[in-house]
Amino acid sequence: MAAATLSLLPPASLRRHNPRVHLRPKFSIKGSAPVLTQDDLKKLAADKAVEYVKSGMVLGLGTGSTAAFVVDKLGALLKSGALSDIVGVPTSKRTQEQAAALGIPLSTLDAHPYLDLAIDGADEVDPSLDLVKGRGGALLREKMVEAASDEFVVVVDDSKLVAGLGGSGLAMPVEVVQFCWNYNLVRLQELFKEEGCDAKLRLDGGGKPYVTDNSNYIVDLYFKTPIRDSGAAGREIAALEGVVDHGLFLDMATAVIIAGGSGITVKTK
């Protein structure tokens, strides 16, 4: 459809007899493309990820705002009959409650130790498709479920892309036992002193220590520069007594679905 044009030229008679009238150039009023919000982008990525799901699969259900769109879509497909006989293994109590409310059959790793597919979001994605996860507090259960899956599909918007893990300057979480948590906070900060790392105990909305679904605390690491060697960093963190797990998800993603202003991009290893 041709763009509408609004003419501001005066009538011909007025142009002939009134030399003071200044002629203005024509201009066009064109419709602009709608601006997609971050939630719009997350939903687009989630819709694409659900295309990987087939009837009869056992699925790992992720945690967080993007994963919530995936769970909503799965519930709608089950209700419509487009999917059937799927079983979900949730990665948090929050996801468990959401999926149950949508009528998605649920189970655990004890009953289903091998999963066909897990779908989850991420807080950071680097060019090697390594991830930072866990800012929602579910990193341990997420890692257990996603490590047990044949495929792990990650859904993000393009704001989560980084040149190197830790590069966003936002939290890289480490789950620690409550016992002598400050002892481990100090050790974690010393471990990454050269990276200019700042370690902070995560607090809840009431100013008390945030407690995970597994009754642990979280120490958030904030890096001023990207982690130089994420593999070595993961091994060093995991070796500390009292550390339960960390938010570096390395060599786990089989595909990353990225929603951006230019559309959907799928990256695979």
Image (spheres, rainbow, N blue to C red):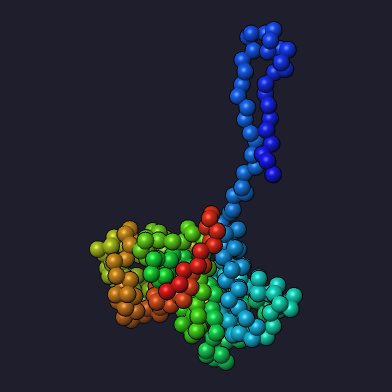
Image position of 122 (left or right of 193): right
Determine the image quadrant of residue 110. bottom right
Image position of 186 (left or right of 77): left
At a point 73% along the width and 12% down the height, the residue shown is 13
At a point 26% along the width and 64% down the height, the residue shown is 193
| Near-viewer residue (98 or 13) | 13
Residue projecting furthest to the left = 194
Residue projecting furthest to the bottom = 111
* Image location (x, y in percent) of residue 30: 64, 39
* Image location (x, y in percent) of residue 237: 33, 75
Image position of 266 (left or right of 77): left
At a point 69% along the width and 44% down the height, the residue shown is 1
Give the position of the C terminus as an image quadrant: bottom left
At a point 31% along the width and 73% down the height, the residue shown is 233
| Near-viewer residue (82 or 135) | 82
* Image location (x, y in percent) of residue 167: 37, 60
